[in-house]
Image: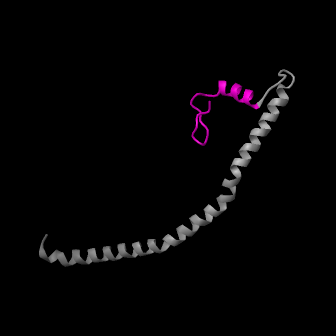
Amino acid sequence: MPAEEWPVLEKVLEEALGKLQSIRQRRSSDGGGVRSLRQAIAGQLAPHSRKAPQVGNAYRERLFERIRTILSDTMSKSTVVDLIKEVARFWPSGATSRRGGAAG
Protein backbone atom coordinates (compact mmCIF):
# COMPACT_ATOMS: atom_id res chain seq x y z
CA MET A 1 0.00 0.00 0.00
CA PRO A 2 1.41 3.39 -0.93
CA ALA A 3 2.32 5.68 1.98
CA GLU A 4 -0.13 8.40 0.89
CA GLU A 5 -3.09 6.00 1.42
CA TRP A 6 -2.26 5.33 5.09
CA PRO A 7 -3.85 8.54 6.44
CA VAL A 8 -7.11 7.70 4.66
CA LEU A 9 -7.01 4.13 5.99
CA GLU A 10 -6.22 5.40 9.50
CA LYS A 11 -9.21 7.76 9.41
CA VAL A 12 -11.55 4.99 8.20
CA LEU A 13 -10.28 2.58 10.88
CA GLU A 14 -10.70 5.20 13.64
CA GLU A 15 -14.30 5.84 12.54
CA ALA A 16 -15.04 2.12 12.39
CA LEU A 17 -13.55 1.54 15.85
CA GLY A 18 -15.49 4.50 17.24
CA LYS A 19 -18.73 3.08 15.87
CA LEU A 20 -17.88 -0.35 17.24
CA GLN A 21 -17.23 1.14 20.67
CA SER A 22 -20.56 3.00 20.66
CA ILE A 23 -22.41 -0.18 19.64
CA ARG A 24 -20.74 -2.08 22.50
CA GLN A 25 -21.71 0.63 24.98
CA ARG A 26 -25.34 0.60 23.79
CA ARG A 27 -25.53 -3.17 24.01
CA SER A 28 -24.05 -3.28 27.51
CA SER A 29 -26.52 -0.65 28.68
CA ASP A 30 -29.42 -2.64 27.16
CA GLY A 31 -28.33 -5.70 29.13
CA GLY A 32 -30.20 -4.47 32.20
CA GLY A 33 -33.37 -4.14 30.16
CA VAL A 34 -33.08 -7.68 28.89
CA ARG A 35 -32.41 -8.96 32.41
CA SER A 36 -35.42 -7.13 33.81
CA LEU A 37 -37.62 -8.52 31.03
CA ARG A 38 -36.33 -12.02 31.76
CA GLN A 39 -37.13 -11.58 35.46
CA ALA A 40 -40.60 -10.26 34.65
CA ILE A 41 -41.33 -13.24 32.40
CA ALA A 42 -40.00 -15.66 35.01
CA GLY A 43 -42.25 -14.02 37.59
CA GLN A 44 -45.27 -14.43 35.31
CA LEU A 45 -44.47 -18.11 34.65
CA ALA A 46 -43.73 -19.12 38.25
CA PRO A 47 -47.36 -19.53 39.39
CA HIS A 48 -48.18 -21.55 36.29
CA SER A 49 -45.21 -23.87 36.69
CA ARG A 50 -46.19 -24.53 40.31
CA LYS A 51 -49.74 -25.30 39.21
CA ALA A 52 -48.80 -27.59 36.29
CA PRO A 53 -48.42 -30.81 38.31
CA GLN A 54 -51.82 -30.23 39.94
CA VAL A 55 -53.44 -29.80 36.52
CA GLY A 56 -51.84 -33.02 35.29
CA ASN A 57 -52.97 -34.92 38.38
CA ALA A 58 -56.53 -33.60 38.09
CA TYR A 59 -56.65 -34.54 34.40
CA ARG A 60 -55.38 -38.04 35.20
CA GLU A 61 -58.00 -38.51 37.92
CA ARG A 62 -60.82 -37.33 35.61
CA LEU A 63 -59.58 -39.68 32.90
CA PHE A 64 -59.45 -42.62 35.32
CA GLU A 65 -62.95 -41.80 36.53
CA ARG A 66 -64.29 -41.70 32.96
CA ILE A 67 -62.64 -45.04 32.19
CA ARG A 68 -64.03 -46.59 35.38
CA THR A 69 -67.51 -45.32 34.46
CA ILE A 70 -67.29 -46.64 30.91
CA LEU A 71 -65.94 -50.01 32.01
CA SER A 72 -68.14 -50.43 35.09
CA ASP A 73 -70.54 -52.69 33.20
CA THR A 74 -67.83 -54.96 31.83
CA MET A 75 -65.27 -55.01 34.66
CA SER A 76 -66.29 -55.97 38.13
CA LYS A 77 -63.16 -54.77 39.95
CA SER A 78 -60.82 -52.43 38.09
CA THR A 79 -58.07 -50.66 39.91
CA VAL A 80 -55.88 -47.80 38.84
CA VAL A 81 -52.93 -50.21 38.59
CA ASP A 82 -54.91 -52.51 36.28
CA LEU A 83 -55.85 -49.56 34.08
CA ILE A 84 -52.25 -48.34 33.91
CA LYS A 85 -51.02 -51.82 32.97
CA GLU A 86 -53.67 -52.13 30.28
CA VAL A 87 -52.91 -48.72 28.77
CA ALA A 88 -49.15 -49.38 28.95
CA ARG A 89 -49.56 -52.52 26.83
CA PHE A 90 -50.79 -50.40 23.92
CA TRP A 91 -48.60 -47.32 24.50
CA PRO A 92 -46.13 -46.57 21.65
CA SER A 93 -42.73 -47.95 22.61
CA GLY A 94 -40.86 -44.71 21.83
CA ALA A 95 -43.20 -42.47 23.83
CA THR A 96 -41.84 -41.00 27.05
CA SER A 97 -43.23 -38.76 29.72
CA ARG A 98 -42.26 -35.07 30.01
CA ARG A 99 -39.99 -35.94 32.94
CA GLY A 100 -37.88 -38.21 30.75
CA GLY A 101 -38.96 -41.59 32.10
CA ALA A 102 -40.14 -44.48 29.97
CA ALA A 103 -43.86 -44.68 29.39
CA GLY A 104 -44.20 -48.38 30.02
Image coordinates for residue 91, horizontal then vertical, percent = 64, 28
In the rendered structure, the answer to whether residue 28 lies left or right of residue 54 reads: left
Image coordinates for residue 15, horizontal then vertical, percent = 31, 77
Report how many numbered discs are placed on residues in the image: 0
Residue at image position (34%, 77%) is: 18
Q: Nearer the viewer, residue 6 or 72?
A: 72
What segment carries the magenta color? 80-104
Q: Which residue lies furthest to the right in this view?
A: 73
Q: Residue furthest left?
A: 2
Image coordinates for residue 72, horizontal then vertical, percent = 85, 26
> Which image quadrant: the C terminus?
top right
Q: Which of 30 and 49 is in front in this view?
A: 49
Image coordinates for residue 78, horizontal then vertical, percent = 80, 26
Magenta segment: does it hold 9? no
In the rendered structure, the answer to whether residue 98 lies left or right of residue 86 reads: left
Residue at image position (52%, 72%) is: 32
Residue at image position (23%, 76%) is: 10
Query: Does 97 appear above or below 74?
Result: below
Q: Which of 52 and 83 is in front in this view?
A: 83
Q: Which of 76 and 67 is in front in this view?
A: 76
Residue at image position (31%, 74%) is: 17
Q: Toward which corner of the image does residue 39 lie, by quadrant?
A: bottom right
> Which image quadrant: the N terminus?
bottom left
